[in-house]
Amino acid sequence: MRAARFGLSFAVRVPTMFSVDGTAISSANLRGLADLWLDGATPSDADLRAAKSLAAKMAAFEGIRPFSSVVQQLVDCVSQPDFKIEKVRELIEADPALAARIMRVANSAAYRAWEACDSVPKALLRIGATNVCELAMAISAMNFFKDLDGVGKKIRDHSAGTAAVARELALRVGRVGASPKLFLAALLHDVGKLLLIQTGDAGYAALAGENPAPNSLHLKEQAQRGYDHAILGGQVLLSWNLPEPIPQIVACHHQPKTVPRAFAISRSIDLLRVADCVDWLLEQGHDANSPHVRKLARSPDGTRAGLSVADLVNLWDDLRAVRSDALSVFK
Ligand SMILES: [Fe+2]
Ligand SMILES: [Fe+2]
């Protein structure tokens, strides 16, 4: 029962949640939003206030579109059931900066570059045309924040590192098919933080700059604002038309219990949450023998993701390598 409600509320109600001015929300849609962090309970006044403040924040992002016309054309192109791969190649090659960035990703450790990828057709072969299109969207979205320094830069690095680690973990636990979308969701998982920083939200940069462990900042955000960066990021990615399940994974990455275990994205969220912690531990300089690595493997996220202590310990140096490679690709 709950699974059906979740699917409907997420897939259908969320995209139509806000009015043009971002303030008028129907009671049905408020319920849809409240479902995300109430796990189906009746929304309280505080939850409804949170929904309204999120709507107001979303209104500030109305009209923001981080995608170039090339990326928009790419999206339109691969949305056609009979799209031609030649057209995808032409579009990418028309934007040399984008083509170069896509080839750098195709050559990165995250994509297991056993052989140099030196052309767009090879990148299309390695990554896949649809995945390349989504990668172009993610690269554009990250580029949108490229001028941020300080805390913003740290968050961008964390996003790149988490993406590479998430992809590597997905491959190691046999989630090969889910790995491209997981890579993109992980790359964009903290986009809500970048938005809050970029819009000059008072005090937010200082709060995020404390560099708290994963799974703690969102609690302060909820206490202060009534919503967190995950929900905000998921909403903005939906408004940017990022394909499913990327916005859903992002929206729920700090509230995995809102996603029924029967849903396939639930395992992607587990892997993202583990990758989130792995990146933080690596950034803090922890090595494979750290008790925190064992604790992470034994945590509910680690267990649900299918990672044993031995898996994570043995993988640690590889995860460090793919992370550092990703930081150079996305810097
Ligand atoms: Fe987060
Ligand atoms: Fe994160």
Image: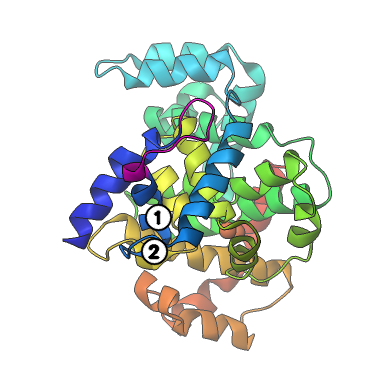
Residue under label 1: 34
On whether ligand 1 comes within 8 Å of the CB at mark 2, the answer is no
**Residue 4, position as x, y percentages in the image:** 19, 54
What's the residue type where badge 2 is placed?
A: Leu
The quarter of the picture where the C terminus appears is top right
Q: Nearer the viewer, residue 269 or 45?
A: 45
**Residue 15, position as x, y percentages in the image:** 39, 35
**Residue 35, position as x, y percentages in the image:** 35, 56
The quarter of the picture where the N terminus appears is bottom left
Q: Residue furthest right?
A: 150
Crowdedness of circle 1 by 10 Å Cα count: few (<14), some, many (20+)?
many
Decide: is 52 above or below 145.
below
Q: Residue furthest front?
A: 45
Decide: is 248 above or below 211.
above
Q: Secondary structure at mark 2?
A: helix
Residue at 43 percent of width and 73 percent of height: 301
Q: Total of numbered circles in the picture?
A: 2
Q: Secondary structure at mark 1?
A: helix
For the question of whether residue 169 can be seen, the reply is no
User: Pointers 2 and 1 in contact (CB under 8 A)?
Assistant: yes
Q: Nearer the viewer, residue 76 or 203?
A: 203
Q: Which residues are magenta?
A: 19-29
Magenta stretch containing residue 23, yes or no?
Answer: yes
Ligand 2's image quarter is: bottom right
Magenta stretch containing residue 222, yes or no?
Answer: no
What's the residue type where badge 1 is placed?
A: Ala
Q: Residue furthest left?
A: 1
Q: Which mark is residue 176?
A: none
Q: Residue furthest bottom?
A: 291
Residue at 74 percent of width and 40 percent of height: 198
Residue under label 2: 38
Rounded to the nearest angstrom, the CA distance separating label 2 from label 1 is 6 Å
